[in-house]
Structure formats: structure tokens, C-alpha cells
Amino acid sequence: MSISLVKGQKISLAKQDGSSLSKIFLGAGWDVAKSGGMFGLFGGGNKSIDLDVSVITFDANKKQLDNVYFGQLRSRDGSIVHSGDNLTGAGEGDDEVIHVDLSQVPSNVQSIVFTISSFRGQTFDEVENAFCRIVDQSNKELAIYKLNEKGSHTGVLISSLKRNGGAWDFTARGLACRGRMVNDMIPQITAEIL
């Protein structure tokens, strides 16, 4: 049964037997907010929104180790793989997916941070139904987090994974950030979670 997370909530990704999950993916989706006319029923606004899901890895000393985003779809060590860029947010379900092989993440990686940002500069006032979900290797949804952060910002620190002994903890973050690309958000991210 999937857990519906709230901002700041943390869950362990350890299995019931105490072992850690080996593979997960983070799926993210969004829709364009309805605007114009009575109750948003009569058009107006854009028909698509280009959000980009990205990953940053950090060591224990807050040093950025790697980025995975639309311009680099695989981490240098191969443990993190991006599904590719969705330019519109159209369709049901996950718009972009990040696969993480936790068993292959190098031991110096202490935190894995997931972000979403608007490459074209559209704000989160123009986004609705945004979510991220964590799914295990058997395709079972473990948790879902609805991103309700409306505003004039162009990015959100969605969530993070942090080593906790031999397992990983997942935390729903929901921090509004400035920046159209993942690198623009790094100062806010390091101040917030590391």
C-alpha cells in the first residue's frame, strides 16, 4: 500500500527484513493549470509546460559529485538513468522518470537530490497536479508526494534520498527554488538539506 507523503515527511526504504531496496525509480508528472474564462473552462494560457526532473548527488562534505538531467541522461558511474525530456507534460501518469540502482551508487555518495524546474521560465502558478512517486523494482508504488507549491518560482526541490547505515531514507521536501536549470538551484539546495 502506497503512502501519501506530506512536506517534510521521511520514510525508510529498508525492507521489512532489514535489507535495503536495490532499485527504485522516481516518477514525476504535471499538468498545465487551467486559466481564463469562467472557472478556467474557456481556454487561455499555454497548452504545454516544459518541466525538467533532475538529480544531483553530493558527498558528506556537501560537494556536488554528479548531475543527471536532460543534457546528461546517465550518471558517470551508471547508477542513475533519466528517461528523457518530456517537453509538454501531456498525457497521464509519469512524464519523466529517474531510475536509481541503489546497489550501484558509489559509497562516497551520501545524498541524492531530486528537483524539477521550468526550462522556459514558466512559473509554478502555471502548473497543477504535479507529483512525484517512488516505485520499487517490482513496480510497487511505495510513496507519492503531491507538489502543491504554487507561486512565481521556477523550480522545486522535490525530495531527497540520504544514506542511513546500509539503507536509504526518502524525504519529501517541496522547497520552492529559483532557477530554470538544476545548477541554478544548488545554493538553495545545499543550504536546505545538506
Image (cartoon, rainbow, N blue to C red):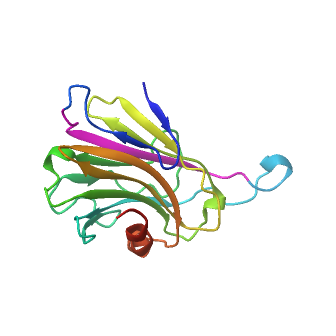
Up-down relation of residue 129 to residue 35 (above or below): above
Identify which residue is drawn at 14% across, 56% down: 106
The location of residue 176, given as percent across then percent down, is: 54, 63
The location of residue 30, given as percent across then percent down, is: 54, 49
Q: Would you say 40 lies left or right of 189 here?
A: right
The image shows a total of numbered marks equal to 0
Identify which residue is drawn at 60% across, 50% down: 148
Q: Would you say 149 lies left or right of 160 here?
A: right
The location of residue 13, given as percent across then percent down, is: 30, 38
State which quadrant residue 183 falls in.
bottom left
Q: Is residue 192 magenta?
A: no
Q: Nearer the viewer, residue 130 or 84?
A: 130
Q: Would you say 156 lies left or right of 129 here?
A: left
Outermost front residue: 165
The quadrant in which the N terminus is found is: top left
Up-down relation of residue 15 to residue 25 (above or below): above
The location of residue 42, given as percent across then percent down, is: 81, 50
The quadrant in which the C terminus is found is: bottom left
Q: Which residues are magenta?
A: 19-34
Q: Nearer the viewer, residue 159 or 85?
A: 159
Q: Which secondary structure dominates the residues rendered in magenta?
A: strand
Identify which residue is drawn at 15% across, 44% down: 103
Q: Would you say 34 lies left or right of 137 here?
A: right
